Amino acid sequence: MKNQPLNDQEIELLLSAPTSGAIEAVRALEGDFMVLGVGGKMGTSVAAMLRRALDAAGKKSTRVLGVSRFSRPEAKTALTELGVEPISCDLADPEQVARLPQVANVEYLAGQKFGTDSAPDETWIQNTVVPSLVARKLRASRIVVFSTGCVYPFTPIDGPGAHETTPVAFLGEYASTCVGRERVFTHYSRKHGTKQLMFRLNYSVELRYGVLVDIGQRVLAGAPVDITMGVFNLIWQGDACARAIQCLQHVESPPKILNVTGAEKITLRETAERFGKIFGRAPVLTGSPADAAWHSDASESIRLFGPTTKSLDEMIVMVAEHLRAGGRLLGKPTHFETRDGKY
Ligand SMILES: NC(=O)c1ccc[n+]([C@@H]2O[C@H](COP(=O)([O-])OP(=O)(O)OC[C@H]3O[C@@H](n4cnc5c(N)ncnc54)[C@H](OP(=O)(O)O)[C@@H]3O)[C@@H](O)[C@H]2O)c1
């Protein structure tokens, strides 16, 4: 008999369980909190964890605001039920940005990745013009700016991965706009003294999307898994959110840069084989690992915040169970195999 898969509400509760580190951070931080781009894949988890961490810290009157266009209107209802106050706002519209409240602690998650190749002009607006509007409006806030490991060049797969001091590359249109997002925020941090942190995240994983879902789905269906990318890193979404909250205590001007992902360098082959063992079918592998890939050295974030709470094997087992039970998926593949920067 199949196990019942977790539903969306249960998954959000799992992802937003506050860690002791997140609770201590919000206890120490003064002022309200605002999550920009709350309607996407990670926004609800960050905002809900903030709410739960504040409640656990006895700060029930501190507000958590969630800003998005809410192109998925159901995200608004889910946030309200979780105690987050939604604000509809198109951050690309200067007049709407001007009406946003001044809030002390800001998580910036807005951005565009997919569709970049078909509408590059839109991606540049979303990833570079929006940051300029937000950075000027919220110059008095602490801001954690979600960025990506894609700002780095590929580094050798037998090495530790890109370090925070590795110079950025401009590997394709999307990655270039992500460098642009960092550059624009950094400019205003220097100009106004705004304290920021560039949160260079590599692959957040949960039960409904992420690299593990992409690989597991293919193995379960007997579809090929392209292992040319060779290695990658990932982090449980709950850990990524907790670190993003803790990072509000590490903002600096000019901005601090931090790689955020798990400690393990993960090989695509071994991951596919692990899913194969669970599903009782050999994975169909295509390609062969290249010499270099997008992967990051997360030792500084692990030094600051300690180890992550979920091991790779725990995450694989949870994702495999969700897939096998026919759990709901977001239908948003990560395109982890893309090596030409085209999304
Ligand atoms: N998920 C990952 O594994 C991962 C890995 C590396 C980096 N990151 C970075 O982390 C951030 C958050 O990730 P995510 O996966 O949650 O991204 P996401 O699913 O793309 O969510 C971002 C959300 O921002 C909102 N947004 C975009 N433009 C906006 C605008 N003009 N005004 C208001 N809201 C706007 C959109 O929601 P509405 O349609 O409701 O406005 C969108 O869903 C992204 O910037 C991404 O670059 C994520």
Image (cartoon, grey):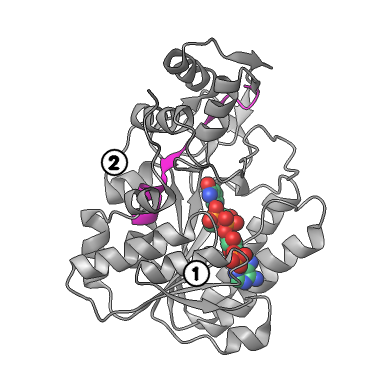
The residue type indicated by label 2 comes to Thr
Task: Give left or right: position of 302 versus 106.
Answer: left
Within 10 Å of disc 1 (Cα), the crowding (few <14, some 14-19, many 20+) is many
Q: In the image, what residue type sits under mark 1?
A: Lys
Q: In what quadrant does ligand 1 lie?
A: bottom right
**Could one spot residue 182 in this view of the protein?**
no
Residue 313 position in % (x across, y down): 36, 26
Quarter of image, res 244: bottom left
Occupied quadrant, residue 128: bottom right
Instruction: Residue at 75% x, 51% y: name it.
Output: 173
Q: Residues within 10 Å of mark 2 (few under 14, many from 20)?
A: few
Callouts 2 and 1 close, C-beta under 8 Å: no
Secondary structure of residue under mark 2: loop
**Can you identify the residue that label 2 sits on?**
309
Instruction: Give the residue displayed 31% in from the left and 42% down from the top.
Output: 308
- x, y percentage for residue 79? 43, 67
- Determine whether 290 is above or below 149 in the image: above
Nearest to the eye among marks 2 and 1: give it: 1
The residue closer to the viewer here, 254 or 62, is 62
Residue 303's disc is: none
Which residues are drawn in magenta?
226-242
Specify whether residue 162 is in view.
yes
Quadrant of the snapshot with the C terminus: top right
Between marks 2 and 1, how big is the CA–CA gap? 28 Å
